[in-house]
Amino acid sequence: HYDPDLPTIVCYPSRLEQVWTNIVVNAAEAMADTTEHPEITITATRHGDDEIRVRVEDNGPGIPDELLERIFLPRFTTKQGTVHYGLGMGLGICRQIIDAHGGHIKASSSDHGACMSVTLPIAGPQVPDQPDTLPKE
């Protein structure tokens, strides 16, 4: 779902592609084998005068409250011992990329699934004198 008046933003597209891919893959993996009719909804809207917000919501099992902030820590994974083993780098890198854009990423959860909310400035990252201050891959 996209706001028809959504402005174009200044950003590093390939870096944000990493963010969207990681969030969608995590949602799909969380719903695999746990959700009868898995669904991912992506909503992009204007947020105030200077920002946009992208929300990725799923109808999976959600994220336990005690893990909501920890999932963004480097090397933290909820996938240990599962078929979809994770290194715990994905959401940590997502946070670095969003922070470098001058934005925010937040996770929330309910009985209806999980939501990742990304807020980005329309004007883009504030880059001092360096050509690329985003995290290296």
Image (spheres, rainbow, N blue to C red):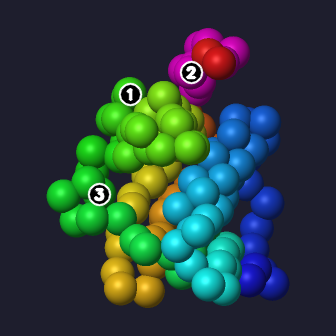
How many numbered marks, from 0 up?
3
45 above or below 69? below
Left/right of residue 121 with respect to residue 18 in the rendered view: left
Q: Which residue is mark 2?
A: 135
Regarding residue 64, the answer to whether it shows in the image is yes
Q: Earlier in the sequence, mark 1 or mark 3?
A: 3
- Amino acid type, residue under disc 3 in the picture: Leu
Q: Which residues are magenta?
A: 127-135
32 above or below 67? below
At x 35%, y 65%, the residue is 63
128 above or below 25? above
Measured as percent of width and height from the top left, residue 78 is found at: 38, 46
- Specify the label residue 68 is tagged with: 3
Q: CA distance from mark 3 to mark 2?
A: 23 Å
47 above or below 10? below
- Amino acid type, residue under disc 1 in the picture: Arg
Q: Which residue is mark 1?
A: 75
- Quadrant for the N terminus in the image: bottom right
Element assignment for label 1: loop
Q: Earlier in the sequence, mark 1 or mark 2?
A: 1
Foreground tag (3 vs 2): 3
Residue 51 in magenta stretch? no
Report crowding for label 3: few under 14, some 14 to 19, many 20 or more residues within 10 A (C-alpha): some
Q: CA distance from mark 1 to mark 2?
A: 16 Å
